[in-house]
C-alpha cells in the first residue's frame, strides 16, 4: 500500500491481505486497526463485537 491506512504502518499488511482476499471483516484487538472506519467497505471489529453481531 502506497499511502498508510493505519496509524501504525505495520498494520497496513492486514488491510492489504483483506483486500486481496476480498474479506469484508477483520477481527482484531489492535486499537490502531480498530480506529479505521469504512476503509473500502472492510468492517474492522473486535472479537466481542463479532460475537454479538454475527454469532449470538
Image (cartoon, grey):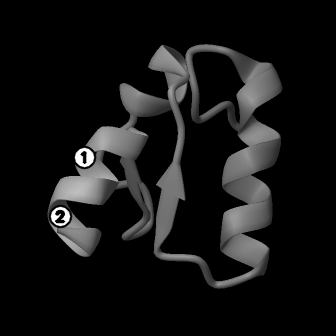
Instruction: Please rate how many residues cluster around mark 1, counting C-alpha atoms within 10 Å: few if below 14, some from 14 to 19, many from 20.
Output: few
Q: Which percent across, then down, holds residue 40?
A: 44, 66
Quadrant hosting residue 17: bottom right
Q: At 46% from the left edge and 16% from the top edge, which residue is drawn? A: 31
Separation (CA) of disc 2 from disc 1: 6 Å
Q: Residue 53 shows which numbered tag?
A: 2
Q: Are marks 2 and 1 in contact (CB under 8 Å)?
A: yes
Q: Residue furthest bottom?
A: 22
Q: Which residue is mark 1?
A: 49
* Viewer-closest of 40 and 47: 47
Q: Which percent across, then down, holds residue 39?
A: 41, 55
Relative placement, left or right, of 4 versus 31 is right
Q: Secondary structure at mark 2?
A: helix
Relative placement, left or right, of 34 versus 4 is left
The image shows residue 32, relative to residue 15, as above or below, that is above
Q: Secondary structure at mark 1?
A: helix
Res. 26 in view: yes
Q: At 37% from the left edge and 70% from the top edge, which residue is drawn? A: 41
Instruction: Please rate how many residues cluster around mark 2, counting C-alpha atoms within 10 Å: few if below 14, some from 14 to 19, many from 20.
Output: few
The image shows residue 51, relative to residue 3, as above or below, that is below
Quadrant hosting residue 16: bottom right
Quadrant hosting residue 37: top left
The image shows residue 33, relative to residue 48, as above or below, that is above
Quadrant containing the C terminus is bottom left
Q: Which percent across, then down, holds residue 48?
A: 30, 41
Q: Which percent across, then down, holds residue 10?
A: 82, 23
Amino acid at each position: 500500500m502506497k499511502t498508510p491506512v493505519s496509524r501504525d504502518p505495520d498494520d497496513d499488511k492486514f488491510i492489504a491481505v483483506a483486500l486481496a482476499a476480498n474479506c469484508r471483516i477483520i477481527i482484531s484487538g489492535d486499537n490502531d486497526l480498530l480506529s479505521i472506519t469504512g476503509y473500502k467497505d472492510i468492517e474492522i471489529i473486535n472479537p466481542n463485537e463479532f460475537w454479538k453481531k454475527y454469532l449470538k
